[in-house]
Structure formats: structure tokens, C-alpha cells
Amino acid sequence: MRRQAVIYGGDDRVELLESGDPRAGRAASALLAVVDADRVTIDGSTIELDAPPVGAALGLCDDVRFAEQPTLARCSAALVAPDIALTAAHCVENARDCAANVFVAGWALGADGAAPSVASSEVYRCVEVLHSDIRGSRGMRLDFAFVRLDRPVAGGTPLPIRLDPSPLEIGAPLMLASFPWGLPAKVDATARVEDDRDGARDFFVLAADAFEGSSGGPLLDAAGAIAGVLVRGEGDVEPRGDCDTARVIDGPGAESATYAAWAVRALCAARPVDELCDGRDVCGRAPPSDACEAETCVECDALAPSEWTCVEATFAAADGCDCRCGAYDPDCDDPTTPVFGCAVGEACGTDAMCLALPDGGVTDEWSCNPARWLDGVCDCDCGAADPDCQPDACDDHTERRSGGRGCAVASAGDAGAWLGWAGLAALLVRSAARCGRRRLARRPR
């Protein structure tokens, strides 16, 4: 987990096979350690692991929990089909990462606390990254990867994925299964959702005792389904003399996890995989679905035009304005939505390309989304005059007279008002045409 080594309140991690939580039992045969390939040497049936004590490897203080246990994993993953694993994209993003890592089953202490014993048959090669997405720099904070292994995991039972597109409830209990600091598998059954990010549903914020190596670990909901993939968090170890200890925080959680439903939706839109996507729409739902009403699933029913070059599932998905994607994203119609794909100091124009902001950027008085400054559309009621507006388009930046968005049209008492109504009518016509195109483009259910 990036820059992450933190405990919230008390340390609630327990050994995977010692947990009394039934979800831990289900996770035991599905959890996989992502390991640098050069740390595993196989000669026939003989296997040698480069797994030194974590305390010595990381310079931890002697009294740090589990300091004497071996460290091996660099990330975590979960089996979601007989030969498909779900992890974080920053762990295995592309073919190069795929070749540089192996997936190890059975990296856990025995039920009696015995040291982990891994057989050569429990080591699996990554043969293909089916789909990955890592857009932390674009604001969406997506971070997931589906990888195919060289063979089905023997004795492995894939975990189900929570496909419900609705956000998790704040306070919802979760269980994190992972390899913190590369240690043998641990679970934290006290994890909880602290921010559902309902407006974006790209990731959620939670409190969980997680460390580097926990990235990619599944977060299981009360039903035992994967609700999210742990990807990042704040904080780090704290120095204590000439050694380090884990940081302890009594405040709110700051870990982040990609919504698993979003990951499946993106996979099935970009590259349908029979084991996970057969019969599902781009939302990842398997029809028929009583939970999928038109008014709640419209964002998943629009298909991207042929010019669209980004992930299809991001088109008209109410997930933010995607720019530089070859076609205009209808999400850009919402002036409050964030803009992705443009550099700092750029806005997304109506031609789906990024436009450079004027020298000095947005004025201090501008109160709307900075990406809406000089994006080709006149914005009113933003505290400052928008350079996109023609003269007299906005009266005191609050009253629209000749087209734009952000406030009511002036009263029909002068020519300026008439022009305002004409501009509004034109906008409505364009909006209706666009809505019509989206209805025609909806995926049949």
C-alpha cells in the first residue's frame, strides 16, 4: 500500500487461520501473495523463498508486532475466477509487471501458528493483464487490475464480487485480508467505511490497519463478497531512536479502496471476459436485475461513440468530465463535475480537447470549478466574469442574457432578454438531441 503503515486505535490484525470470522475462512483459499519473481527459486519440486524476518528487513524495533515473522509479498490479490485474480494496478499494471511477479497461494501461518510452508505447486505465473486502470493523477483515483494466471489455482475458491453499483453505507463493517509488510496473511475484521464518495463512486475511504503489502487486498462486506480493493492510505512508520515503529492514529480513517463494482464494470466494457462478464452489461450486473431501474442505471446504459478512445464505461457515466477522449463526454454538461485528462492550468473545451487557461489562471473571485474557466461555454453566477462570455452575456455575473449556463435568463423586456430566451431554446434543442442520441445508444437489457 502506497506510503502506508498505520494502525487506527488498537492493532486489530490477526492471523488468517486464527480468525473466527467466517469470511476469513472463505478468503483463505482465495488470497494470493504478489511476489517479486526473483525472490522465488524453483528447482523441480524444490522451492526456496527469499523471506527474511520483517523486523530485520525493514529496520523495525524489536517490540513491533510480528517483527520476527518472515516477509515475502509486495502486494496482495484475491482469486475471483479459477485462474483470474484481482489486485491493485500499481502492483501489476502491464505485461512487464506481469512477467516480473508470481502469485503465491498458502502464504499464511498454520492453524497452530506453524511457519508458512509453500510448495512449488502453489506458485503461479501471471500470463496476462486482462485489464488495468490507474488514474490517480487524474483525480478519479482508480487503481485495479485483473490478471490471468498460468493455470487454475488448485483448491482455490474464488470470492464473489459485490456488483451492486450503489455506494457502501458509511459505517458499514468490512474485513480486510492482506499481507501487511509482506507478512503471512492477516485479517482485520474491524475495518469500516468512513466516506462512500457517493458522487463519484470510484473509491471509498475507510479505516483499516493496513501496511505496505496490503495493496490489492480484498475488502469483504458482511456477505463475504469483495466490495473493494485496498489501494492507498496516508501516514507512515515513525522513527524511534535507531529503529522504526508503526504509526498509531486515533482519528478518522484515511485508507482508500477502489469500488470492486466499478472495476468489473470497466473490465466488462473494455474487454468482456466470460468468467466475469458473461451476460453482464457495462455496469457489471447480470440481467435480469430488479435493482436496475432506468432512473438509477441510466449512467450505465449509454454506449460511447466510435470516436471515444478512453474506457467505454467512463462515457456518460456520471463519473466526471473525461477530456482528450476523442469525443465529447456528456458528463461535461455538469459545471460542478471534476475534469479528468487535462493538465493543471487547462480546461476541457466543447471540442473534447484541453484548452490552456490564460496566464495567471483562474481569478481569485471565481467560485465555480476552475476547469470551467475558459472552456468554451459562458458561465454565470461564478463570482467573476467568464472570458467565454460575450459582452453583456451576464449582468453582474449572475443574470444570463444571451446564452450560457449558471443562472436564470433575464426578463423578456428587451432585446437582450429575447436573445437570452433564444439562446436557452437553442441549448434545450441541443440537449434534447443529445438525450435522444443517448436513448438510442443505450445497451439493451
Image (tube, rainbow, N blue to C red):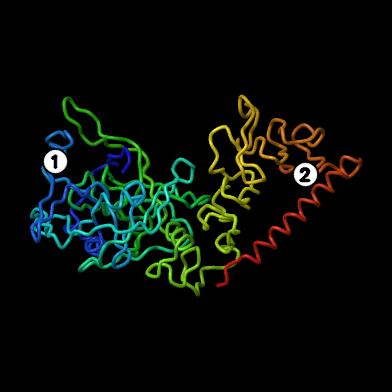
Which label belongs to residue 67? 1
Q: Is residue 265 left or right of residue 247?
A: right
Judge whether 113 appears above or below 367 on screen.
below
Q: Is residue 102 left or right of residue 120?
A: right
Q: Amino acid at mark 2?
A: Ala
Q: Element under label 2? A: loop
**Residue 207 point in image, percent of width and height:** 34, 46
Judge whether 401 appears above or below 33 on screen.
above
Residue that mark 2 sits on: 408
Of 214 and 290, which appears nearest the observer?
214
Of 305 and 320, which appears nearest the observer?
305
Judge whether 286 appears above or below 246 on screen.
below
**Residue 325 point in image, percent of width and height:** 56, 49
Quadrant occupied by the N terminus: top left
Quadrant occupied by the C terminus: bottom right
Q: Element under label 1? A: loop
